[in-house]
Amino acid sequence: MYQIDINNPVHIHFIGIGGISMSGLAGLLVSRGFTVSGSDRADSEILDGLRAQGVRIFIGQGAENISDDIDVVVYTAAVHPDNPEYAECVRRGLPMMERAALLGQLCKFYKRAIGVAGTHGKTTTTSMMAHILLAGKKDPTISVGGVLPSIGGNLRIGNGDDFLFEACEYTNSFLKFFPTDEIILNVEADHLDFFKDINDIRNSFAAYAEIVPEGGHVVINGEIDNYNEIIKNVKGEVITYGMKEGGDFDYTAGDITFDNMGRASYTLVRKGVKGIRITLGVPGIHNVSNSLGAVALASALGLTDEEIAEGLVSFTGTDRRFQKKGEVCGVTIIDDYAHHPTEIAATLATARKYQSGKLWVVFQPHTFSRTIALKDEFVNALKAADAVVMAKIYAAREVDTGEISSYDICEELQALGVESYYYDTFDEIENFLLKNCVNGDLLITMGAGDVYKIGEHLLGD
């Protein structure tokens, strides 16, 4: 496989450059003097940012975008051999690699490569870790799977020893990385269009944990079922965290309290000894757990308790993670990226601490395969809302085979006595909400697709 030399810049072309991870990697290489070009299916603010850095962007993908001066091509897992640019690169015999392979190669150029993995919570925990490293003046390079306001986007170029990134398990991408230190937040059923079952997923996480070398650290949520199976072959130090009563964890939280915005404060308990008081800048009990993972690794890397506390209180969230978009006619509109049942349950539990009016959820399922595999779990999580409006499934990389519809979830919620509706279009949903939401209500647009546009339209953005 082609090997990137970060000290020897060449021309790299990205097929699918507009993705949150691809754009971050492209920006990182631009900062190192590489010539970067790329294509995507539609324009976006992310692409505008890359243009401003001198990246040549093509909207639409065609063989004509592949110029003679390209040295290597990077593509996403969503790009298939029938893609015209991919096919042209093969015809020309150009070196090619997946996004994950590129990230893995970049890991090797840093003293510490910190990967944050888990079925959910990766973006938030990576962002927490980023704030802690910045509070500790570590000058890290950061690649996060969302827009982090404190770094002005999804990428920060640092001159320090640390490379912090999200490690996604889909298509076993994270097995191509070379982290020296890891956080494993949770291991649950997801991406069942790729994995056979939960045991297949657990085996992948075990292989990921095994990558860490001697002298490194694997911080793992001790509440994961039989977590010892996942860390049994780890060569580095294993550190556990958790919140379950009676659990034996290296790090836990005591004396948890919440303010009127649902943001927690807690006493850090390290190996049974009470320590510093920590206050979070983001709401939800699930974020106490996320923060413990970041605290445990930061402590292992030598950050002080004061730096850790400063970093955590300064983190007030990333875009699309319980993000307050505004208010219209007394209705508060929140947007959240939750697209897995556990994430939905956590978001709705947080919302209950946030408001006292009617709780509305507009949910857009993400991919047909996930909706089929987790339909019952989606119903169980969504029933915590007062009213649910279902949007069409966001297909992403998949094709509709007719096996599942959002209306199926709507019907099951109605059978449980939950006020639930389904509409084909965003316009219909927006008109319905304008007629039915009233002063004091809380409306959450939820999902990993483009459902956020509904809230923005209601606010007139």
Image (tube, rainbow, N blue to C red):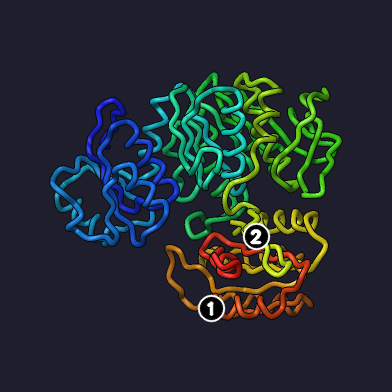
Q: Position of residue 297 (x, y in %)?
A: 62, 28
Q: Residue at x 67, y 40 (%)?
A: 290
Circle 1 or circle 2, nearest the eye: 2
> Is residue 225 among the parts visible in the rendering?
no
Secondary structure category for the residue under label 2: strand
* Kind of residue at badge 2: Gly
Q: Could you tell me residue 85's position as x and y percent?
A: 23, 56
Relative side of 21 to 228, left or right: left
Q: CA distance from mark 1 to mark 2?
A: 22 Å
In this view, the residue in front, 203 or 384, is 384
Left or right: 197 in relation to 75: right
Find residue 363 and name its label: none
Query: In percent of the image, x 68 and y 42: which residue is there?
Result: 224
Q: What quarter of the picture does the C terminus occupy?
A: bottom right
Of the 4 image quadrants, the one containing the N terminus is: top left
* Residue linked to disc 1: 425
- Depicted 315 relative to depicted 452: above or below: above
Residue toward you, 248 or 421: 421
Q: Quadrant of residue 439?
A: bottom right
Name the N-terminal-most of marks 1 and 2. 2
Residue drawn where x is 56% and y is 30% of the image: 233
Q: Are marks 1 and 2 in contact (CB under 8 Å)?
A: no
Q: Which mark is residue 326?
A: 2
Q: Residue at x 78, y 24 (%)?
A: 271
- List x then y, in percent, for residue 398: 44, 66
At label 1, which amino acid type do we have?
Answer: Thr
Q: Mark 2 packing: few (<14 Cα in 10 Å), some, or many (20+)?
A: some
Say left or right for 176 vs 369: left
Q: Report x, y in % for residue 307.
A: 66, 24
Location of residue 431 (image quadrant): bottom right
How many other residues sit within 10 Å of disc 1, few (<14), some (14-19) or many (≥20)?
few
| Element on which disc 1 rests | loop
